[in-house]
Amino acid sequence: MEEKASNTMDYINHMFPTEASLSGVGPLMQKIHSEIRVVDAEILAAVRQQSNSGTKAKADLAAATHAVEELMHKVREIKTKAEQSETMVQEICRDIKNLDCAKKHITTTITTLHRLTMLVSAIEQLQVMASKRKYKEAAAQVEAVNQLCSHFDAYRDIPKIIELRDKFNNIKQILKSHVLSDFSSLGTGNDGEENNLLQQLSDACLVVDALEPSVREELVNNFCNRELISYQQIFEGAELAKLDKTERRYAWVKRRLRTNEEIWKTFPASWCVDYLMCIQFCKLTRTQLMQIFQNLKEKPDVGTLLLALQRTIEFEEELAEKFGNGHTKKVTSDVEESDKGENSNQLVMDIRRKYEKKLDTRQGNQDDDKDANKDLSIPGAGFNFCGIISSCFEPHLMVYVELEERTLMGSLEKLVQDETWGMDDGSQTNILSSSMQVFLIIRRSLKRCCAMTKNQTLLNLFKVFQRILRAYATKLLMKLPKGGMGIVATSTGMDGHIKTYDKDERLICYIVNTAEYCHKTAGELADNVSKIIDSHLTDAVDISEVQDEFSAVITKALVRLVHDVEIKADIEMAAMTRVPWGTLESVGDQSEYVNNINKILTSSIPTLGSLLSPVYFQFFLDKLASSLGPRFYLNIFKCKQISETGAQQMLLDTQAVKTILLDIPSLGRQTAGAASYAKFVSREMSKAEALLKVILSPIDSVADTYAALLPKGTPSEFQRILELKGLKKADQQTILNDFKKRGAGIPKFIPETPVATQAVHVAVTPVPPPMVSTPSAAVIASREDVLTRAAALGRGAATTGFKRFLALTEAAKDRKDGPFRKLFNA
């Protein structure tokens, strides 16, 4: 509304901008009233027009309704006339319809009588042909009679039709008996008669095709059974019913297939008579072989068993090639690549001779392996020759598996015996050559088994592989050096023993790498077997336990490496305890035992870093750091009395040992986990530095310093510190009692100031005044005060030894290397 008001005001202001223009208001109002009157007149005219239009619409609607009523009346009249016309037409056509129905019946009767005449004539002709054995003509006539009979299916109950059908069935029975009789006489005449008979039988097959399918099945079964009667009689005899005569069975059927080629041509190709006969032969042979196995009183000879199985598999493949699309054994690509040196079609007798001597892993003939598994069944037949006979060997192949195990075990012993164990073998892989040879003979054994079976026997052989690999893992574990050689070498300084120990370290690294290789390759072996073996046995293929054993070998070998370094370090630790720390007069360069520790590590670490993988080298470092740090800490307690000068020298040695340990990753040229390792080493060695700080602290503040720097310390350790400081039993007891009384009130915190920095501050930090030995004064007022007291390192700042220490520290500023320079720059 405000907007409209604003527009109105704008319009008025526009029309009358000045007072003078207001004189035009009257004329403008007259003009507006005139326009209003015109608009009202137009509205009134429109309303009147609309009123007239409504009246006209009602009139038009009434007219339309009247027109519809007239139209409906006319439609009823037309419908009545149509009904009258239909009645008239029906009356006219009544007679014509009767005549048409009669004509249709007459035509059907004539056609049926004509077909009946033809059927009677055809049956009579067929009877004559059957009696004269005219098979070719009879085959066509049977087809014709079958078609004529189909027209009389609606007249089955009529006696004449029943009579004709019975006569036709009798004729078919006669034809069937004649055909069977003629086929039974095959092979009983001379060559001339045989040729005529074959032609007659070829025509007879046409009749058989025209008869019911059961006739063909009976004929083929009778023929196949007759062919196999002689086979059954021959090979059920005592002489040939043996496993070693299996090959002669297949030779017999091949010979029969060749000699009966003309007979096979007699049958239509769609009958597949030779194919069906081979199926029956295979089933019969399987039954007889199973009987032979049941009659065996002892385990079969392995060579005979494998030869029979190999010939059986070859025969099945020949049948599959002849009647199907061919057949090849499926072997995974990994087995093929590993076993190119062996012939997949090697005779089982060669395998037997191979078993009778030790397995030679370097012999074999190369041959291309096939890796396709084709369909064996004839289209529409649905039969696969693969395994139809050979599957009966499966329950009896355990002797083969046992022989494979004995052979593999013998080969393993020979490989382990011939192994150089990493000594001057020129290996570039850092693994033992015997491990590769072990998997090579396993793959060859796997390939031999895959050529014969992929069922339970393959699973049993896989379990043999597991036992072989476990045995190899045990061999690796037994070859780990027993340790102790480092003690003799270090104590005597004999180079021969040192070289021997270096070889032990290399051997341990080789064992670690070999176990890792075996762990990985064993998993690949299990994957390959899972792809080869029958699907229902895939879940049983598991080699995780074997891999666990190789993992255990790796762990024990790395622990042995750490242990051997510990043994050599312990010798130097013992030398550290023999140093007269209580009588040292001055602080010098790092001690000899530190140099020896450095020599031990610099001689071992580079070799270990070059041979071990980063993962296992890091594991070695972690174990070593967690061992040497605490050992050094505890070794301080094993020393005798330690004077202030001795403690200062030992603090210097501690920093040098820490630097040596921090340099280990760079010595091994593997710095992947150096940061975490350095942090761990610094933490462990800081404990030893803190311990020496406590030893250097004054008697009256030693308890407070111990609680501040070593908050997790025990009273027994504290007592040992007092002994190291040279206190008498009576003095110790007083301090211990005071320590135990106020132990709960001592602040528990760990120093954050680097120990090396604290050592440098010794020269400039003033010596605090003695503490009052009262219970209230025993509690440290502040953390800074305790650390300041600990940094003082005792009251002996003015001694000759400490002056020597300061002089060396200042001299270290001008040196580019050396332990004091490292200490100064720490």
Image (cartoon, rainbow, N blue to C red):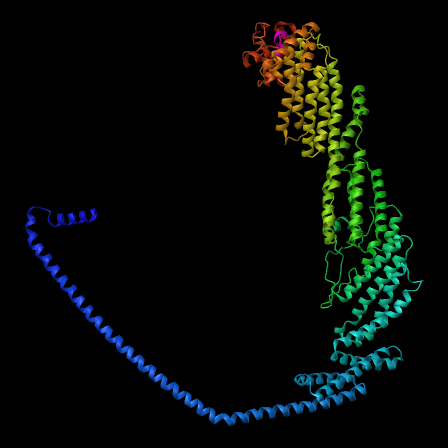
* Left or right of residue 526: residue 56: left
Residue at the spot 85% in from the left edge and 67% down from the top edge: 253
Q: How many marks?
A: 0
| Residue lying at 71% horizontally and 68% vertically, measured from the top left | 380
x, y percentage for residue 432?
Answer: 77, 38
Percent position (x, y) of residue 173?
Answer: 79, 82
Q: Position of residue 494 (x, y in %)?
A: 81, 22
User: Which is nearer the eye, 558 or 486?
Assistant: 558
Q: Does residue 630 appear in this view?
A: yes
Quadrant of the frame with the C terminus:
top right
Q: Position of residue 227 (x, y in %)?
A: 85, 71
The quadrant in which residue 496 appears is top right
| Among the 4 quarters of the image, the one containing residue 66 | bottom left
Q: Is residue 219 magenta?
A: no
On screen, residue 525 above or below 509: below
Q: Within the image, what quadrant is residue 168 found in?
A: bottom right
Residue 809 position (above or below residue 211): above
Magenta part of the chain? 697-703
Q: Is residue 447 visible?
A: no
Q: Is residue 700 magenta?
A: yes
Going by the picture, which residue comes out furthest to the right?
A: 239
Front residue of this view, candidates 213 and 555: 213
Q: Main secondary structure of the magenta part?
A: helix
